[in-house]
Image (cartoon, rainbow, N blue to C red):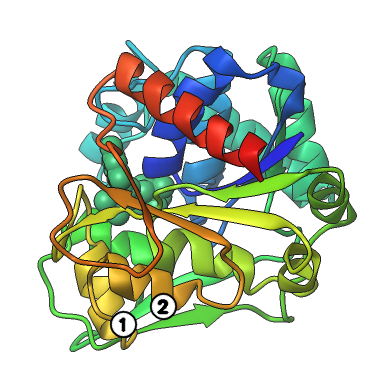
Amino acid sequence: MITFLSGGTGTPKLLRGMQKVMDRHEISVVVNTAEDIWISGNHISPDLDTVMYLFAGVLNTDTWWGIRNDTFTTHDEITRIGLDEFIAIGDHDRAVHIARGNMLRDGMRLTNITKNLCDRFGVRENVLPMSDTEVTTRVKTDLGLIHYQEYWVRSKGRIPIQGVVRCSKESPESSEEVLQAVAASEVVVIGPSNPITSITPILECRSLKDALRNKFVIAVSPFIGNAPVSGPAAELMKASGFEATSAGTAGCYRDIVDLFIQDIRDPVEVKDAIRLDTLMTGEEKSIELAEKILHLADRN
Ligand code: GDP
């Protein structure tokens, strides 16, 4: 069994390869939920949706969010009527958000809801939200503290940020299911996800870091030089006091990672890092990287 820590783009690209080279029942994924948001009365969990749709074979892999060939009839109508739905939600995708929202309102745990939805989608992998506690990543801007989705989706990351804050009513803890998955794993892989908005929220859940301490932990950098492969990771790293590079990423994970992987093109030197081609431009590249990581995991 291998447990992966995942956001909604970089690690799912790696999982796309892993599901081809591993027994799918041997894959557990602990997914960030700090980007979750209620929109138009429904509950969006962008990273959980992406991982579930990927394993179900319905993910739109052009965008790495939403369902392939989805329609946007409801979104178009809602917007025409005048509602502020600032995220374009597909009709089939929305059905999942409606179902999840209803189950949450009924008092179900997000872990059980996710299992329920994954079963309906025929997912064989073990997909787990990082916690059943609600957590939200907000960013400090001149407009005040705003939800990460407001910053990245509504403002397209164009406004300056001065800091990143995690908000929750009670301090989030890892679910029993997450701790069991880690305990049953020989190796834990932190994929090339955003260290600040995707991985740190998972690592902040109570008990997880302790559970990782006696595991062999591999991390893959999302940076090449001083830029991430995609997305706002550089701005978020700087706003959190880290260098926006692989070295900064290694610094973020320094107390838990045993093996750090950076790209062969990366001009930044990270001591003792392994160099691999981490640019997953298509399924073949994802498979190649997955095989190499499994090889490294086996050697441990
Ligand atoms: P989010 O939840 O959509 O922000 O997605 P993640 O946090 O899972 O992933 C975002 C990160 O993935 C970005 O910082 C990118 O640099 C990284 N990323 C995307 N594609 C690749 C890739 O092919 N290789 C590597 N090394 N990183 C990637």
Residue 83 position in % (x across, y down): 31, 48
Q: Quadrant of the N terminus?
A: top right
Badge 1 crowding class, 10 Å Cα cut-off, few under 14, some 14 to 19, many 20 or more, is some
Residue 88 visible here: yes
Asked where in the image residue 72 lies, by quadrant, the reply is: top left
Residue 111 position in % (x across, y down): 78, 45
Q: Establish if 151 lies above or below 11.
A: below
Q: Answer left or right for 58 relative to 172.
A: left
Q: Nearer the viewer, residue 279 or 261?
A: 261
Q: CA distance from mark 1 to mark 2?
A: 8 Å
Asked where in the image residue 204 lies, by quadrant, the reply is: bottom right
Number of the label disc, if any, that sits on residue 251? 2
Type of amino acid under label 1: Phe
Q: Residue at x 74, y 67 (%)?
A: 208
Residue ID for mark 1: 242
Residue 109 position in % (x across, y down): 82, 50
Q: Establish if 97 lies above or below 35.
A: above
SS category of the residue bearing label 1:
loop
SS category of the residue bearing label 2:
helix
